[in-house]
Image (spheres, rainbow, N blue to C red):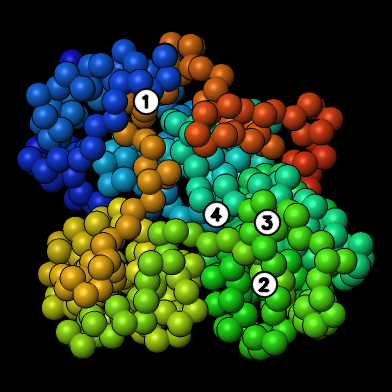
């Protein structure tokens, strides 16, 4: 029986669990869980409420023995965008909360960790596995936790486009793969001498590529690509909009008209045509609304370019979180990014005497907008975290939750496609090359 009281567990940190407030606002139906996870879900659903006073003692029964048994051999990870309950719980049980860049480096930087459990999305777990040491295993709490950006830039969609462009431009073409892609797409970047990027280092990576006189295919976020081009001084006439999803994979240069081919030939940056649904809802009018009410507006660069251009600042999740951490009493911030992140940022700001609002959460029906959370990333909850850790302790963790670099998972069905050892070796080598190139560019002084 745990000797820790509920009050003792509300330790001060950037993310706090407050007594009485719901840990989880939405319950998944029982058939949402894998068979091995259902007993844990049944117990969780039978709890009288979702307050820390009920949920934490239940979690302690399973997680504290695992933490005691594994010690530093177990590393729990979560991304800022996860539902607040998972972010806070992962930190509470000794884990780490980070952006996608920092998450990718966790295995490499924590060699004592043999079991890495990630509460986020599959592409992040894949990146961790790609850079992991041979003695490390990566597990995901819910393999169906995905990302819409990654869903519309699958390898079978991007690879034909890369082949089409390389047939015309040869080694002049370089792929830059956003972190929100599978390991197989990152491998396409590595095979062309390119790199991975995140929202925090995309400008550095693009400028590095352009300095080599390369023609860049930027996959997959067309908004981030357009924003980074603006930051880097790449004129609109030197950019070309490629298709996204299945349409992107089916585009053929031979079917283009002469004018379109000329624009493609002139382009320095080719933007893959997909975007993040969470960030496309933002509009310049929203910036005007909150600024007129005394708010400083900070936006994520996956937002449309016109929004970034009129905002007071823009940057990665780390940039946005740091701005909230630095907030002073009386500060007012309007933030344009994923809704769960903003909810957590609002609580952090409140503890500092500051105020945070979601840019799209405007109490005016003429805007017809609402704060948007990432539904696919939020396919995790306390039973998922408890189940995978307890089953690892018992030696019965389901293989479906094991993430090996190069895996592809269907976000709807959970079906997994795993490469043969030889195929995986080639993919991992190229993906690792692209990730390590990103790190080299980012850390360069």
Cβ–Cβ under 8 Å for marks 2 and 4: no
Q: At 20% across and 40% down in the image, what residue appears?
A: 25
The residue carrying mark 3 is 247
Label 4 CA crowd tier, 10 Å (few <14, some 14–19, many 20+): many
Labels 3 & 2 near each other (Cβ < 8 A):
no
Please tell me which of labels 3 and 2 falls first in the chain: 2
Tell me, yes or no, if residue 197 can be seen here.
no
Image coordinates of residue 103 in percent, x first then y, are: 51, 49
Question: CA gap, disc 3 to disc 4?
Answer: 14 Å
Among the two numbered marks 4 and 1 on one chain, the one whose residue lies closer to the N terminus:
1
**What separation in Å lies between label 3 and label 2 (alpha carbons)?**
12 Å
x and y percentages locating residue 240 in the rendered image: 70, 76
**Which residue in the protein does label 4 denote?**
149
Mark closer to the observer (3, 2): 3
- Residue drawn where x is 37% and y is 42% of the image: 378
Does label 2 or label 1 sit earlier along the sequence?
A: 1
């Amino acid at each position: 029986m745990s000797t820790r009281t509920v009050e003792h567990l509300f330790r001060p940190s950037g993310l706090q669990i407050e007594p009485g407030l719901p840990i989880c606002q939405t319950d998944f139906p029982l058939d949402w869980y894998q068979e091995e996870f259902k007993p844990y879900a049944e117990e969780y659903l039978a709890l009288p409420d979702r307050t820390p006073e009920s949920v934490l003692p239940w979690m302690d029964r399973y997680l504290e023995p695992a933490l005691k048994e594994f010690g530093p051999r177990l590393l729990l990870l979560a991304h800022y965008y996860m539902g607040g309950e998972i972010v806070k719980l992962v930190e509470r049980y000794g884990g780490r909360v980070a952006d996608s860049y920092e998450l990718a480096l966790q295995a490499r930087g924590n060699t004592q960790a043999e079991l890495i459990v990630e509460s986020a999305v599959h592409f992040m777990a894949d990146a961790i596995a790609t850079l992991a040491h041979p003695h490390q295993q990566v597990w995901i709490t819910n393999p169906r936790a995905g990302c819409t950006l990654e869903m519309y830039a699958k390898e079978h969609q991007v690879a034909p486009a890369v082949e089409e462009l390389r047939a015309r431009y040869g080694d002049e073409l370089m792929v830059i793969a956003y972190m929100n892609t599978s390991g197989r797409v990152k491998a396409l970047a590595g095979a062309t001498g390119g790199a991975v990027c995140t929202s925090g280092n995309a400008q550095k990576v693009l400028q590095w590529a352009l300095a080599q006189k390369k023609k860049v295919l930027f996959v997959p976020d067309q908004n981030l690509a357009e924003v980074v081009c603006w930051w880097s001084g790449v004129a609109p006439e030197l950019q070309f909009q490629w298709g996204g999803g299945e349409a992107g994979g089916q585009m053929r240069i031979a079917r283009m008209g002469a004018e379109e081919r000329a624009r493609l030939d002139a382009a320095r940056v080719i933007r893959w045509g997909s975007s993040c649904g969470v960030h496309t809802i933002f509009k310049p009018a929203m910036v005007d609304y909150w600024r007129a009410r005394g708010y400083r507006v900070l936006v994520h660069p996956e937002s449309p370019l016109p929004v970034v251009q009129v905002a007071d600042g823009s940057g990665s999740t780390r940039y946005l979180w740091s701005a909230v951490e630095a907030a002073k009493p009386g500060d007012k911030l309007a933030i344009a990014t994923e809704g769960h992140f903003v909810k957590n940022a609002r609580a952090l700001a409140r503890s500092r005497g500051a105020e945070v609002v979601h840019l799209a959460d405007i109490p005016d029906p003429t805007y017809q907008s609402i704060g948007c959370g990432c539904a696919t990333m939020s396919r995790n909850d306390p039973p998922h975290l408890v189940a995978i850790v307890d089953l690892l302790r018992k030696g019965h963790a389901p293989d479906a939750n094991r993430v090996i670099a190069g895996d592809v998972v269907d976000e709807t069905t959970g079906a997994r496609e795993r490469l043969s050892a030889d195929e995986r070796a080639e993919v991992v080598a190229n993906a690792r090359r692209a990730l390590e190139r990103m790190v080299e560019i980012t850390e360069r002084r």
